[in-house]
Image (cartoon, helix red, strand yellow):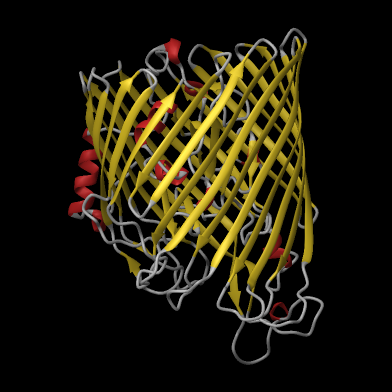
Amino acid sequence: MNCRIPVAARTPAFTLALALALHSPGAWAEEADAASSDTRIVVTALRTPVAADRVSDTVTVLDEAQIVAAQPIALTDILLRTPGISMSRNGGYGATTSLRIRGADAGQTVMVIDGMRLSDASSTAGGYAFANFLIDDAERIEILRGPQSILWGSDAIGGVVNVRTRRPSKPLEGSFAVEAGSRDTASARAGLGGSSAAIDWRLSASRFSTDGISARSNGTEDDGYRRSAASGTVSLRLAPGFSLDLRGYWSDSRNDFDGTAGDSLAYGRTEEWSGYAGLNFALLDGKFANRVAVLQTETDRENYDPARRVRQITFDAHGRVRRFEYQGTYTFSDALQAVFGAEREAQRMTTASPSNSTAPYVLTQTKAETDSIYGELRVTPLTGLTLNGGARYDRQSRFGGNTVYSAGVVYTPNAGATVLRAGYDEGFKAPSLYQLYSVYGVDDLRPEQARGWELGAEQGFGEALRLTAVWFERETDDLIDFAYCPTGGTLPEACTIPGTSTTRFGYYANVKASHARGLELGGSAKWGILFAEGNYSWIKAEDRTAGSETYGRQLQRVPRHLANIEAGVNLPQGIRASAAARYAGESYNAATGREKLDDYWLVDLRAQWQIRESLSLQGRVENVGNEKYETVSGYGTLGRTIHLGLRSRF
């Protein structure tokens, strides 16, 4: 396989990033003392615990120590430090945020917290908006890359982000963290929990506020952001082999934003909550594990414009997703395991865009249901070799049936020191309710389809050095995009709102295709008190829409080159200090047009001092050079920022 880098990519910045990524090492995947078989990482994003050296797809696992060291505010802050992930944001914290894994569209990533799948049925793409997910009580983060629809269904084309909050290990324990920083930024988090023979429980809450920056790069007034959140988990052991899990997540936020014309008084309110109740029971001496669960996620969004005289609310949307799940895991032996299940998902969307008048506005409700069955078999025919294969069938009330498949192999001849991977996966994304039923909707849209494969290798040299490399490709068809109606002549039927004689200037249609391929390199190194880690990603994600003027062009806001580097010291006195740099190459701002976003380097400094066993002081300076850059044309980004805080776990 020839993975040559294009001549056009051989810029000084690219050459430097590649050199550093190859010789400095990466905050990446399955790092961890995998060379030691007694500390094997277990991946839960596969909906059942699986040792990392038995997973055929690329996965990044970030534990609590890594999260604490990175000192992130938002989940996206730390996701960006891992391979193949880029982000665009329309301003500061709380603004519209789009996350892309390996160049996949923003709505093609599944977000999960404590087993609860988060999504907004009323959003344009129907996926999850990462703008309001802060790090809160997260103890572990997993990023599973590539199409993952076998286990996760719709939207899992780019991958899956799986967050697990802290679990108690003592009869009573707690934690808190407080921080203050530039732009009157303040955050506070606290949690309390306990563990006993009959029950494990933990409750946490957080509050974040900032004056922020102007959402528009030419704005003069700050657009602030406020957010309150809480989460909780309870696990009751009812009897041997029987337990009940109760989980919840809630957030309420307000963000100021600007229009395309510049400063405005507009703001938005978003409230999200998710609940989970699941019964777990084991049969046949524990070989047959079962889970029956019900989940519900609701999102309320409203936008307001105080400049209006009559009706200040400008947008009103409510989305609800209710899921019923059964999953079974039968472990025939250490060498053979089957995972299978059935799901039913019901989506509801209620929306309105009130006009500035006294006339009442009508809230319109739409819905869709999906029934699914899936199964996957994992076989280890000999020590170190694991094979997996699976299939999933979904039947949706609008587009009908859809089937996807996956297969993979992973081999380690030396208990995880060397790992070789190969996998083929398929994914799909159902049309959102907005794309089906809004004023621009078309009710016979087909699901987006993706087929991808990857080859990966990693090599560890004790705890001193670990290197990783992955090559991937993904082809996506039937992508749903906005199609504009002609400005003259006879209009096609699609340019009329269904059921009316009213014309519209555009509609949603299955009109696009894309192809992505890339190389991800990473590594980590330790030498005494010194450490270094880094990763580099080359992503060629192109438009492959037949007859399009942009055929063969890089997809919008997907940099072809991404790199992360960090190096520092970890002193025995409890002091850890590091310098980190992140590079994003240039990218097109929009799917059409020639405007490009410039490449940029951002440099951060971080330090921690463990004052005593249960108390530590931390601080960081982000964007040390006060770099001016944009991830969306015309929208501002954070300049130099200083934060100082205290953290305790007791």
State the residue in front, 372 or 209.
209
Residue 57 horizontal/vertical position (percent): 50, 33
**Vertical placement of 520 versus 199: above or below?**
below
Residue 170 horizontal/vertical position (percent): 55, 14
Residue at 31% across / 60% down in the picture?
586
* Residue 478 can be seen, yes or no: no
Residue 58 horizontal/vertical position (percent): 46, 34
Q: Residue furthest top?
A: 285
**Vertical placement of 131 versus 54: above or below?**
below
State the residue in front, 270 or 526.
270
Query: How many numbered discs sit on the rendered protein?
Result: 0
**Vertical placement of 414 versus 306: above or below?**
above
Q: Residue furthest bottom?
A: 489
Q: On the rendered structure, is 364 left or right of 114?
A: right
Residue at 74% across / 78% down in the picture?
497
Residue 202 horizontal/vertical position (percent): 60, 26
Q: On the rendered structure, is 123 left or right of 563?
A: right
**Vertical placement of 78 versus 254: above or below?**
above
Q: On the rendered structure, is 626 left or right of 359?
A: left
Residue at 57% across / 39% down in the picture?
425
State the residue in front, 49 or 578.
578
* Residue 495 can be seen, yes or no: yes
State the residue in front, 564 or 21.
564
The N terminus: image quadrant: top left
